[in-house]
């Protein structure tokens, strides 16, 4: 529940500690379950725009409070896969746990390769947040990589090749997709920061529009190998109570597998900032 403004959310007390990696910062001094003054929202948003991924530790959030917090950053978005196991509108459960023989959420226990949420939609996801409810003793860490750093580090010749190119995006599970195949520019300009980010992901990006299939595949594989380099990433080892929010326009994320018999329960919310990918 959102309660009266807490001293924890005094904007003067909010600290931003960069991770030291290519992206990511921890924010200290925010209680996400309490009301946030608008200058506090602005401070957090600025950190998110600067670091692309923000980590808030030691939070205590029920579903409603997480939805409330997420709403400070954009319109709530209901995922194409609807509420997957949740009874709170706007909360999407990511979990391998089964109850009465049925999964309580989505995404199981296996590895998930780099992707940007909802890139296969005409208007892809912008901000996503994951809150850790239960964490396995081993595995299940999540790594984000910076689309900016990936783009900046490309050879000038590759940057030149990407000008004007668009790639198709499709979710591997057919029914999640819109009827039409969606394509987006391979490098986008972030509407708030103005920076260029690489926008291709091994999980969703399928082909390059207008290139012979072999050439398209070769270029995509080269880009997938490029983004996989650890120097572009920040890996997060989850603790219960972590709330991590990220900007899908300039990041991709992947997850390590974890033992199927371990329990992992995460609550995801999305904040939509009106966006169509543009070069
Ligand atoms: C997601 C996602 C990864 C994880 O919720 O979009 O990719 O670590 N989750 O659970
Ligand atoms: Mn995801």
Image (spheres, grey):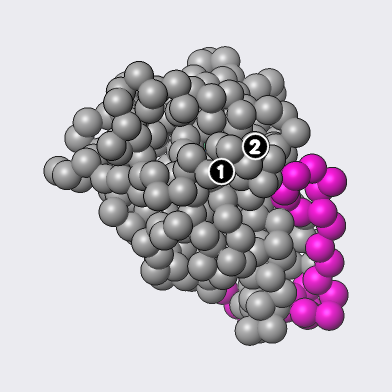
Locate residue 15 relative to residue 58 in the image: left or right: right
Image vertical order of residue 275 relative to residue 252, above or below? below
> Viewer-proximal residue, 215 or 91?
215
> Viewer-proximal residue, 48 or 99?
48
Locate residue 217 relative to residue 5 in the image: left or right: left
Name the image quarter holding the N terminus: bottom right
Q: Residue at x 69, y 23 (%)?
A: 137
> Viewer-proximal residue, 238 or 218?
218
Provide the residue span drawn in magenta: 1-25
Query: Hey, which quadrant is residue 54 in on the image?
Result: bottom right
* Residue that mark 2 sits on: 155
Q: Callout 1: few (<14), some (14-19), or many (20+) C-alpha neighbours within 10 Å?
A: some
Looking at the picture, how far across and down is residue 39, in whole percent? 69, 83
Q: Callout 2: few (<14), some (14-19), or many (20+) C-alpha neighbours within 10 Å?
A: few
Locate residue 255 relative to residue 237 in the image: left or right: left
In the structure shown, which secondary structural element does the residue marked by tag 2 occupy?
A: loop
Q: Is residue 97 magenta?
A: no
Residue 101 seen: yes
Does the residue at mark 2 contact the one at mark 1 (Cβ under 8 Å)? Answer: yes
Would the CB of label 1 be found within 8 Å of ligand 2? no
In the structure shown, which secondary structural element does the residue marked by tag 1 occupy?
A: helix
* Residue that mark 1 sits on: 159
Q: Residue at x 84, y 46 (%)?
A: 20
Looking at the picture, how far across and down is residue 261, in whole percent? 53, 15
- Compute the Cα span from label 2 to label 1: 6 Å
Count of numbered marks: 2
Q: Residue at x 20, y 35 (%)?
A: 175
Q: Residue furthest left?
A: 179
């Amino acid at each position: 529940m959102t309660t009266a403004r807490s001293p924890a959310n005094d904007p003067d007390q909010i600290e931003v500690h960069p991770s030291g990696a290519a992206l990511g910062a921890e924010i200290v001094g925010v209680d996400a379950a309490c009301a946030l003054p608008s200058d506090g929202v602005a401070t957090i948003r600025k950190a998110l725009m600067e670091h692309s991924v923000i980590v808030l530790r030691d939070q205590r959030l029920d579903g409603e409070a997480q939805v409330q917090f997420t709403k400070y950053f954009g319109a709530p978005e209901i995922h194409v896969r609807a509420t997957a196991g949740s009874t709170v509108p706007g909360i999407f459960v990511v979990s391998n746990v089964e109850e009465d023989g049925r999964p309580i959420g989505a995404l199981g226990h296996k590895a998930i390769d780099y992707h940007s949420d909802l890139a296969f939609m005409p208007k892809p996801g912008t901000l996503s947040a994951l809150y850790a409810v239960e964490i396995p003793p081993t595995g299940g860490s999540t790594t984000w990589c910076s689309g900016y750093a990936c783009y900046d580090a490309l050879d000038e010749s590759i940057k030149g090749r990407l000008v004007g190119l668009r790639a198709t995006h499709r979710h591997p599970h057919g029914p999640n997709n819109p009827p039409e195949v969606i394509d987006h520019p391979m490098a986008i300009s972030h509407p708030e920061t103005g920076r260029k980010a690489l926008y291709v992901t091994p999980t969703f990006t399928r082909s390059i529009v207008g290139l012979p299939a072999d050439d398209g595949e070769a270029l995509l594989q080269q880009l997938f190998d490029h983004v996989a380099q650890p120097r572009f990433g920040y890996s997060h080892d989850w603790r219960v109570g972590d709330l991590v929010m990220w900007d899908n326009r300039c990041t991709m994320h992947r997850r390590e597998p974890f033992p199927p018999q371990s329990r992992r329960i995460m609550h995801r919310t999305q904040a939509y900032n009106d966006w169509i990918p543009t070069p």
